[in-house]
Image: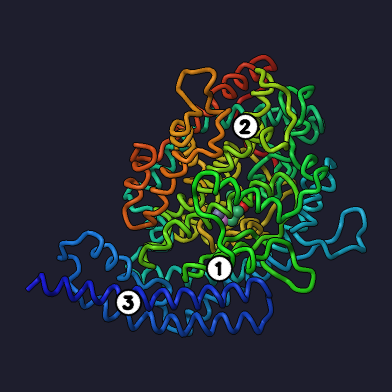
Amino acid sequence: DLEALEHEGREYIFQLDKAMGARKNRASLSEWDYTSNITKENEEKWIQIRLELSQQEKRAWEETRMYRWQEFQDFTLRRMFKKYSQLGVSALPDDKYKMLMRSVSGMEANYATAKICDFKDNTKCNLSLEPDITELFAKSQDPEELKHLWVEWHKEAGSKARHNFTEYVNLYNEAAKLNDFKDVADWWQSEYEVDDFEQQLAKLWEDVKPLYQQLHAYVRKRLRDKYGDHVVSAKGPIPAHLLGNMWAQTWGNIEPFTRPYPDKKEIDITQTMKEQNYTALKMFQMSDEFFRSLNLTAMPEKFWKNSIIEKPTDREIVCHASAWDFYDGEDFRIKQCTTVDNEYFETTHHEMGHIQYFLQYSHQPFVFRDGANPGFHEAVGDTIALSVSSPKHLRRVGLSTGDAEDEQTEINQLYKMGIDKIVFLPFAYTLDMFRYGVFRGSTPPEDYNCHYWRLREMLQGVEPPINRTEEDFDAAAKYHVSANVEYARYYVSFIIQFQFHRALCQLAGEYVPEDLNKKLVDCDIYQSVAAGNALANMLKMGSSKPWPDAMEALTGQRQMKADGLLEYFRPLQEWLTAENQRTGEYIGWEPSKTQYC
Ligand SMILES: C=C(C[SeH])C(=O)N1CCC[C@H]1C(=O)O
Ligand SMILES: [Zn+2]
């Protein structure tokens, strides 16, 4: 009878889950070995192990399908079977699976080891993205140098990946179809468990776009003031190489010469950290201490032993920051090429947020050791960082002797947060709208670069520094495109982290709507056990329930909405609107004069 079948099913699935834990541990260890020492030999080892694991998963999958799990009474049991009924890329025949892995590891290795020549000294041709090009791009205020760095990096990391990328798209789409998806876009969106995901992204963009356009207009004016109207036009898109970041995804590095009130102190903790002899380790210890202050879990001993927190000098590694769960309840690691600056201060909290999520759901069955949706995993660390980067907290830890809280300082602070958080949204939206089109075939390879720039101009209001052709493939110059990492997760994260932040601030008694002494922008949840416990309760769920249940547990809301973000930035939106009216700046942008289609 069904009762007995369900009981048998439960025995089976928990047995399978335990075996899956051992396989995930092995897969993580071999991928760690490859990405922390990029050699042909380690790539082969990693591919070999992944192949063995995929054969084991295929056998298990054939057995799992035999169960009539859709008829089981228990919700959790049905959810476990549903997840294990999806085989993933292992559905590909071995030879195609190998080709797919090689095309991705080829792109990722190319990205990680790409080198370009210096602008001033063209005999110096060993510049890596991290730390060399990143630091030059952050500091330079010479449009010609920035253009050189931009063009050379996009040649080395973008164009050279085009062949592998095209092969990856075909094979990955084949795997999607073997999993009963139309294409990879359909597969990626299924992770969010709603049937109108793309419409939700579009709605969120409509909500935030007016604020972005005001910020874009203000920044374009300040850049035109600085570089002249022959470099930055009055009504066109902003040239992408002038925004302090190789992908123009966050504009924090141009804060020093664009903030609203320049005579107020700069809110840049890079200088202060250097003066106080901060090290990478100290940044990690401070982050760990913040999480512990919320009654969350301390980093385990293996974390401090096994993590790689600075770029090694004796080998090539994947520097792009990452957090690793080895699924054994005690081995958790971060790998990043830390430099002591504001950006890595944020990134360290971002990655520690991933580790905290791993720790909080480590009691779950392996199949539920995941974010409630991919955006949740990206939002944990950033939510904590919203408190850490508040002037109140920076003063508390001696990192900012900023001016007393007055109207102008508050606008400067919101501006600094806005050129990080608001600016990021159209960038993130572009990256996966582009790839949805690629996976659906509506963007054929001969139009890759044209469609990429059309979306960047339409959504972000940026343009390339020089003309582009289909010899170029600028999308792959961004890590996540070369490394096959879905990106809508960050778009979701930058929306929901403000919903989480607002809820935590209320729990901590740090934010009271309409109370001018308890404003959201001043909130710092540091040492609030009430906030920490509520966050822990959400994180412990992992992916055991649909994400609206997890969000509701913390915020009372069941939808992702821009209301948290818009409330946080309301004073800035008012200031920018008034300022753009005062200067008569054109809002929005006319078509670019740069050729790229
Ligand atoms: C820090 C990570 C590793 Se999950 C990252 O890739 N982030 C964090 C924010 C956006 C995105 C990026 O760098 O593009
Ligand atoms: Zn992340």
Percent from the top left, x then y, of residue 519?
A: 53, 24
Compared with 90, 482 (above or below) is above
Q: Residues within 10 Å of mark 2 (few under 14, many from 20)?
A: many
Asked if residue 152 lies left or right of residue 53, the reply is right
Q: Quadrant location of the N terminus?
A: bottom left
Task: Identify the residue at horizontal 66%, vertical 39% (top origin).
Answer: 592
Asked if residue 550 lies left or right of residue 404, the reply is left
Which residue does the numbered mark 2 point to in the structure image? 589
Percent from the top left, x then y, of residue 469?
A: 68, 56
Whether residue 447 is visible, yes or no, is no
**Of pointers 2 and 3, the one earlier in the residue sequence:** 3
Q: Nearer the viewer, residue 489 or 438?
A: 489
Task: Identify the residue at horizontal 56%, vertical 51% (top origin).
Answer: 451
Q: CA distance from mark 3 to mark 1?
A: 35 Å
Of the two numbered discs 3 and 1 in the rendering, the one whose residue sits closer to the viewer: 3
**Of pointers 1 and 2, the one earlier in the residue sequence:** 1
Q: CA distance from mark 1 to mark 2?
A: 32 Å
- Residue 55: image quadrant is bottom left
Q: CA distance from mark 2 to mark 3?
A: 55 Å
For the residue labelled by badge 3, is the local secondary structure a helix, a strand or a loop?
Answer: helix
Q: Amino acid at mark 3?
A: Leu
Which residue does the numbered mark 3 point to in the structure image? 16
Percent from the top left, x then y, of residue 386?
A: 57, 38
Which residue does the numbered mark 1 point to in the structure image? 166
Q: Amino acid at mark 1?
A: Thr
Asked if residue 109 lies left or right of residue 354, the reply is right
Q: Residues within 10 Å of mark 1 (few under 14, many from 20)?
A: some
**Of pointers 3 and 1, the one earlier in the residue sequence:** 3
Task: Identify the residue at horizontal 48%, vertical 59% (top origin).
Answer: 359
